[in-house]
Image: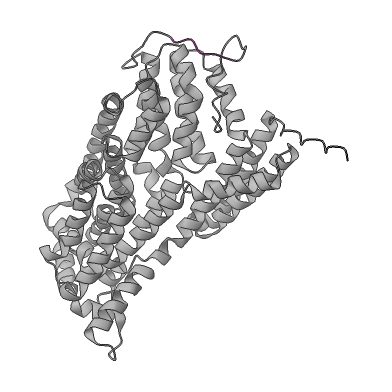
Amino acid sequence: MADQPSRQPPRAPTLLDALAPVVVLIALLATTIALFGTAATDGPLQVALLLAAAFASLVAFKNGHTVASVADAAVGGVTSALGAVFILLAVGALIGTWNMAGTIPTVVDYGIRLVSPAWFFFTATLVCALVGMVTGSSWTTAGTLGVAFVGMATVMGLSTAAAAGAVICGAYFGDKMTPLSETTILVPKLVGRGLTVGEHIRNMAWTAVPALGVSLVLFLIIGLRTRPETAASTAAAEEALERAYNVSVVCLLPLVLLVWFAARRVPPFLAILGSALFAGLLAPFTQPAAVRAFVDDPSLGPVATAAKAIFEAMAIGFVSNTGAPKVDQLFSRGGMASMLTTVWLILGALSFAAIMEHAGFLQRLLAPIVARARSRGALIMSVNASGVGLNAIAGDQYVADVLPARMFRDEFARRGLAPQVLSRAVEDSGTVTSVLVPWNTCGAYISGVLGVPTVAYLPYCFFNILSPLLDIAYGYLGFKTPGVPPEPVPTAGQPAPTGGGHDGPDD
């Protein structure tokens, strides 16, 4: 019997092949936002992402990719996000038990006592920056203190969108400027050429510190010009909180435990879940009345009531039943179930991104950008544009960090630009702008935990907007863009390399 002919390898995508799924995605996203507004993230946006992923699959099939390979790529993309999904679920549990134990109400009570409205946004930015540097995680900072600051803004009658923006500015500065952050460790490794984490952080400081400084000034101006939107005084809010909860430093123990876990480098999921469980165990002692009202089952004894309260708060969130409507509305939040819509959004975005990468569409879109960047400024702007674009197209900051770092590293070496110039451009775009895209994993997470739509807080994310703009300006001015001896880079016979197009994901 004659041998069966071997299967032909998939064809390289044309520019039209690569652009078509992006155009379809943009059209579907625009339709859902036009029809549903900020409620699009409750389901319609997820459907749009999955439909775009299906369209991208059809184009991949046309080019010779098998159903099995595309399916494996989609599954692999989803699998890569499981760590983030577990953290997201743990944060949902933490918000529920921290509300039940009085941790968040205590932070809110102390905050409104100590911070005047004029200094509120400035303080939120600065505190979150410091905590972000200690924990090494913008997600942990936003999911803990960030929730409390948004709660304070609600009680004080201040803009929750501006509060969320202040939290994000501080949290992402802290995340970038610490050797404890995953992306701060990852990006120098991707860029290579002997770049250390310390060199990477020192060079990032030239954009990060001015961006944070400008953000602090703007938030101070906003605070000084802000008048609380509600007529209720801070004193009345304090009185309502004290009637509803036993406010005490003991309630802050779950927060202290979380910081201790972070300092000991405990994995984020275990640290957050451990703090959530500890808060649940603490709640019957710190807030016995609130726990009994939450469970609302007189037939249960104290132990059974406590156990049921812990499971319910971690699973479906805590529901405050104090009789004070504003307090109950503010602290009835959390639970793993509250994060499922966000998980759905992340899965849809990563499925689309994985298929686009597997079929070579993302590389096909990036290669012309690298080839056309003739000057130093244009090259650095191309990195930033690629990071921002990939955050929107691929929906995940790791894709927005990994692909530009791999695609541009050879071109930076050939042109004699130091590796820290590339790593800064990658972080200033891929890392910090991820939170500005509603369907990005970071945007979905932050919006979910803070309870503020992405489109609402985006205008206040000064740090995240300024970082890539400063990096581009430095590139054109030649400021803090050190050079090194150019390195010869093999280009597969091309007279001018396209910046590492051969550095595909399979290398």
Q: Residue at x 30, y 81 (%)?
A: 295
Q: Position of residue 451 (x, y in %)?
A: 37, 58
In the picture shown, does residue 233 fall above or below 324?
above
The C terminus - image quarter: top right
In the rendered structure, the answer to whether residue 413 lies left or right of residue 495 reads: left
Nearest the viewer among 125 and 483 is 483
All told, the count of numbered labels is 0
Nearest the viewer among 106 and 132 is 132
In the rendered structure, the answer to whether residue 218 lies left or right of residue 286 reads: right
Q: Residue at x 42, y 47 (%)?
A: 443
- Residue positioned most to the bottom: 299
- Residue positioned most to the right: 1
Nearest the viewer among 119 and 195 is 195
The answer to which quarter of the image holds residue 288 is: bottom left
Colour option used: one colour
In the picture shown, does residue 94 fall above or below 356?
below
Answer whether residue 347 is magenta in the image: no
The answer to which quarter of the image holds residue 282 is: bottom left
Q: Residue at x 52, y 17 (%)?
A: 373
- Residue positioned most to the front: 1
In the picture shown, does residue 216 fall above or below 347?
above
The answer to which quarter of the image holds residue 1 is: top right
Q: Position of residue 45 (x, y in %)?
A: 55, 53
Q: Position of residue 231 (x, y in %)?
A: 23, 63
Magenta span: predominant SS is loop
In the rendered structure, the answer to whether residue 51 lies left or right of residue 130 reads: right
Could one spot residue 229 in this view of the protein?
no
In the picture shown, does residue 51 fall above or below 292?
above
The stretch of residues the image draws in magenta is 487-491
Q: Position of residue 383 (x, y in %)?
A: 46, 26
Could one spot residue 339 in this view of the protein?
yes
Answer whether residue 488 is magenta in the image: yes
